[in-house]
Amino acid sequence: MQPRFVSTLLSAVSLATIACEHTPTEVAIADHVIVATNRCGAADGPTVEIYVIPPANSGDELPPSASHFRIVIPTTRIALGSFSMPITNGSTAQLVDATASRCSSNSDCQFASTGAIKVSSASDDGPLDVELHMLFANDQSLTIHRTADWRPRSIRCG
């Protein structure tokens, strides 16, 4: 009986160890500012872009030159309404997929490997309610449920 108990105990310890090794580290963003804007995306189609920015850079132009997180949703602000979709790894994304990335500058970005986003708004020009979860290849994750300020731009895509 004792060998079976030891075997069961070792299996439980092994599973706990594996679970601990693969638990993602949550990125700390409690003080970050969340802003959203409209842009022209890939193939010159309209996008809504959401940025998670450190407070010191919240007044910067979008996209910011400092480190930030960026979520790109291939739709217009008016069509956004109540929107929910998975986040696709940017290296395999199609033009209709939402993508998310962590950027150390405006041009040096790492795509999230997986995730999901849900966005809703009470009006066509007000703040957005953003629920987001993304996971990166290095086992870091970002989870938020906050309001994003809407900063519209006058653009013409296509």
Image (cartoon, rainbow, N blue to C red):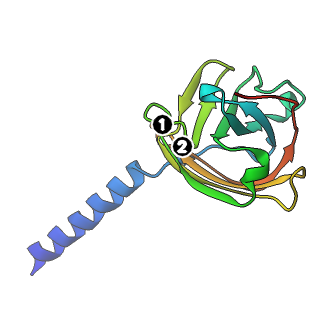
Q: Residue at x 22, y 65 (%)?
A: 11
Say few, some or many: other residues with alpha carbon within 10 Å of mark 1 (under 14 / 14 to 19 / 20 or more). Answer: few
Q: Which disc, if any, is residue 104?
A: none
- In which quadrant of the rendered image does the N terminus lie? bottom left
In contact (CB < 8 Å): disc 2 and disc 1: yes
Where does residue 57 sit, x and y in percent of width and height?
A: 84, 28
* Pick the front one: 46 or 150: 46
Where does residue 90 sit, x and y in percent of width and height?
A: 50, 34
Label 2: which secondary element: loop
The residue at the far bottom in this view is 1
Residue receiving disc 1: 93
Q: Residue at x 45, y 52 (%)?
A: 23
Where does residue 147 sit, x and y in percent of width and height?
A: 82, 53
Q: Residue at x 77, y 24 (%)?
A: 64
* Pick the front one: 7 or 134: 134
Please state which amino acid type lies under the numbered disc 1.
Ala
Residue receiving disc 2: 97
Give the left or right position of residue 113, taking residue 147 as reference.
Answer: left
Please state which amino acid type lies under the numbered disc 2.
Asp
- In which quadrant of the rendered image does the C terminus lie? top right
Q: Quadrant of residue 67?
A: top right
As drawn, 43 above or below 52: above
Label 1: which secondary element: loop
Where does residue 97 sit, x and y in percent of width and height?
A: 54, 43
Total count of labels: 2
